[in-house]
Image (cartoon, rainbow, N blue to C red):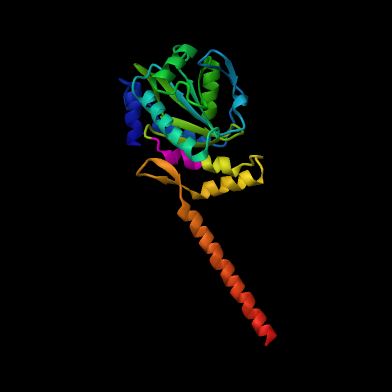
Amino acid sequence: MRALLLALALAGAAAPAAAFDVQRALSVSQAAIGRTVGDHVLVRSDGTRLRLSELAGRPLVVSLVYTGCSQICPTTTRQLLRVARVARGALGPGRFRVLVVGFDTAQDTPEAMRVYARRQGAAGEPDWIFASADEATVRALARELGFVYERAPQGFDHLLQVSLLDGGLRVRRQLYGDALTAPQLVEPLKEIIYGEPAGRGLVAEIADRVRLFCTTYDPATGAYRFDYSLFIGLAIAALILLSTLAFLVRELRRRGAS
């Protein structure tokens, strides 16, 4: 909680942390879990229109920022970029998307979002979309995501929140803070990706399940790796079980013959 308060103080600059009701914001955020967001129309950073329904079918990671923020929002986006790359390496390319939306509608134009993406090193990142929208759309989207923001003297006060949506655009998890770790993102993505029918065929589904159970996070490298020891352990356990069954069958036959 202290980390959240510090982040809010930095995001709002001169605004005192007490002016923003963190407990209420957290309550609103958590209450959004299970809610489906509407088919809002956004504008990509290249100026083209985007309906949220176009992003259905795959998990969607949503981050609301404002481009006028000089510290916290950029830090949050860069950290999200780092862990999303780890997640892509662990889960495979094309398994989820990231949507970054500017909520300061007076300033966060498509051009501003394009510049923001470039400054954070995310321009051209696969499956990343930077977008803006009109005031009514942003407020509706923020309400559905449980994202509370308030104008402060030198910016905005808001929770450092990343919302994780499933393929049906339903909020499944809220992630908080500017120090997001790879497991915090990857593990719930695993639950969504491998917990929903993908229609990719039996072999692909089995391969996904193996990947789910045998991919582990290595804190020393900050990356996920395929842990062969888990697979070998399962194979050994299966051999022991088969050997035990074979022994019991032989014993039963021997006793029956005698």
Q: Is residue 237 above or below residue 252?
A: above
Where in the figure is residue 139, as x and y percent of width and height? 52, 21
Q: Is residue 9 above or below residue 249?
A: above
Q: Is residue 30 above or below residue 64?
A: below
Residue that protrudes farthest toward the bottom in the picture = 258
Residue that protrudes farthest toward the right in the picture = 257
Closest to the observer, 45 or 229: 229
Closest to the observer, 185 or 252: 252
Where in the figure is residue 158, as x and y percent of width and height? 41, 26
Residue drawn at point x = 41 percent, y = 32 percent: 82
Q: Quadrant of the C terminus?
A: bottom right
Which span of residues is magenta-colored? Answer: 180-188
Closest to the observer, 82 or 184: 82
Q: Is residue 59 above or below residue 230?
A: above
Where in the figure is residue 174, as x and y percent of width and height? 48, 35
Residue drawn at point x = 39 percent, y = 33 percent: 177
Residue drawn at point x = 55 percent, y = 22 percent: 140
Q: Mainly helix, strand or loop, the magenta region?
A: helix
Question: What is the total number of numbered labels drawn onto the structure image?
Answer: 0
Residue drawn at point x = 46 percent, y = 50 percent: 227
Where in the figure is residue 83, as x and y percent of width and height? 42, 34
Residue 34 position by quadrant: top right
- Can residue 32 be seen in the rendering of this structure? no
Task: Decide whether residue 98 is among the magenta residues.
Answer: no
**Is 161 placed left or right of 134 in the picture?**
left
Closest to the observer, 5 or 237: 237
